[in-house]
Image (cartoon, helix red, strand yellow):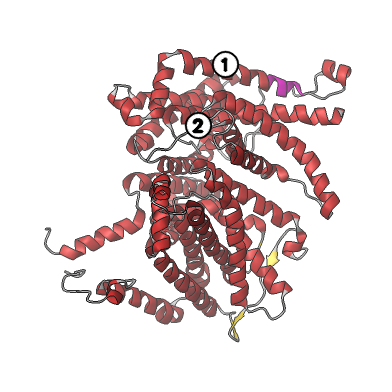
Amino acid sequence: MQFFFEILIGGLLSGVMYSLVALGFVLIFKASGVFNFAQGAMVYFAALSVVGLMEHGLPLWAAAIGAFVVMVLLSMATERFVLRKLVNQSPITLFMATIGLSFFLEGLAPLLWGNEVRPLSLGIVDEPIASILDSTGVLISSFDLAAAGIAAVLVALLALFFKATSIGRALRAVADDHQAALSLGIPLQRIWVVVWSVSGFVALVAGMLWGSRNGVQFALTMTALKALPVLILGGFTSIPGAIVGGLIIGAAEKLAEIYVPQLLQAQFGGNFGGIEGWFPYVFALLFLLVRPEGLFGERHIDRV
Amino acid sequence: MFYREAGQFKTSYVADSQIFPIRQDRIAVCSVLVVAFGVLPWIASEYWLTAILVPFLVFSLAALGLNLLTGYAGQLSLGTAAFMAVGAYASYNFQLRIDGMPILASFALGGASAALVGIAFGLPSLRIKGFYLAVATLAAQFFVLWALTKFPWLSNNSSSGVITAQKISVFGVDVDTPVRKYLFVLGVVTLMALVAKNLVRSHIGRAWMAVRDMDVAAEVIGIPLMRVKLLAFAVSSFYCGVAGALYAYCYLGSVEPDGFSLDLSFRILFMIIIGGVGSILGSFLGAAFILLLPILLDSTLPAIATFLHLPFTNATVSHIQLMVFGGLIVFFLIAEPHGLARLWQIAKEKLRIWPFPH
């Protein structure tokens, strides 16, 4: 039972990391109706910028600010050269444009900063918390806990931003209908820059956390693929959904990784590890068959 | 002037329902086929046959499959490579396990297996659409590759999942030289492209397009949504499956599951975006473009770099390649969402009134 809890908690904490990436998706989708496949590439780009700037002699905090500036510039360029020209196109077109964007970024980032795997230290120790280990015997990494704390703060801030500020309201109006928002005098282009910058900031946080965990490398772009089932489960437009979805997917994935191969092995023999790659997707899909809008998504009614 | 339909009257139903109703089109298609079957095998070098023409045809077929699903039926799919893998591995197993199995039959059965897998992963499309569905097809992508490495039976107990394609012979003729492989692939692709061309003109194709344009409206006017969507998945996966089998047997010779990665799926998606979504011709144009572009960049970039005295490594070339691919996708979506096929259409319209502007 203790083993079970250890895996469960480990899964929940890694789910926090998925939530962070999923959050970036949700922000852009909520505010502009664009499903941004380039979020993973943005995570990679942001993390690589931090490391690259640090290699030029900047301290961590300055490099993080510098990387944020880079992400804002990137958002402005994206708005100027991609989004502005695709206003009012179908969502699928915009989605494919972000696939193009992600390829572009995946090429640009290593071109600017080099492509070798590099470590990134945030100064947070990654060791089991002694007090919990002693009292319950469950291993919890202090790094994971810190990441969970950062994610919680970030989510609270974002929720406040969407609910309480006028710019947050404008964002939601833009998501409903580009053209209607434009004709009401909402500056669509500025809104886009803001929201892409915010999600660039989320990508930066995610990139720094993931990067200091696994090293800053190309594999960071794969975080986007980890976040997709989270989104499906949580609903595309819900910030709490991204969090709860992340926790569920993280826990389910880790538990399945331990227990399902054992079951399969008893049936067929052989080694069936590595189901982490597809299990979240199938899990999310099965859930969709029951509830197509996800946990917290908005129910959408089609009219002809 | 050159492309003029005036004076070509259709006086019977047969004439009206031809695949290529305009004489110029017929001449063009026939001459392309004559060149492809009669001239190219004689003049093309072995490099061109094995490294460019065969993969071009194979990828065209896969793009055609994806185009039927995404371009005509409007169901976005990111799992093309997985269906190709199913086709390749299923064909391999049919050929391996059943004695005296004709190769064409095992290709067809491989395609049919891919169609079954396609239907299984297409089932969610009945309840979800758009992005959700794209994620569902990603599930197919990851699950199939995982299954191929974890069930050793599928790759005949090869430790890493690598299969080596058996020798193939069609109607007693061994398909072993580059020319024969090329002709074999060309025959299959031509046949399947013609079938596809006909399919999209039929009531099935029209139902697909109705579903693509607005599925709720299509259902209201009496199109059986479930059957139409699943058929689109089945047909598309069949095409991809056969393309995968050809990829393994006639292009690479031996393949591993990793060869059918998400990257390949994306490349095929790019082919149809650049070639033209919802166009048979576009699948071929896009495949040619995506295949030739890296070759072009590989040969020109280092030269440009030395000219400009820039330090250049292979890694840099591959990064620039990624950027060019990404940039082109965005460019095409903005400038010409209907792809190269639309440019060809515009050219035809210009030719119709040439040399007068009106």
Label 1 residue SS:
helix
Instruction: Establish whether labels 2 and 1 are both on one chain.
Output: yes
Vertical order, A27 against B31 (above or below): above
- Quarter residue B111 falls in: bottom right
Decide whether residue A145 is among the magenta residues: yes
Residue A120, visible in the rendered structure: no
Front residue of A144/B138: it is: B138
Regarding residue B353, the answer to whether it shows in the image is: yes
Which residue is identified by label 2? A299
Q: Are marks 2 and 1 in contact (CB under 8 Å)?
A: no
Report the front residue among A115 and B307: A115
- The vertical placement of B330 against A160, above or below, is below
- In which chain is the residue bearing label 2? A
To which residue does mark 1 refer?
Answer: A156
Instruction: Give, as a three-letter code, the residue at label 1.
Output: Ala
Front residue (pair B167, A22): A22
Q: Nearer the viewer, mark 2 or mark 1?
A: 2
Q: Percent x, y for residue B177? A: 57, 79
Magenta segment range?
A141-146
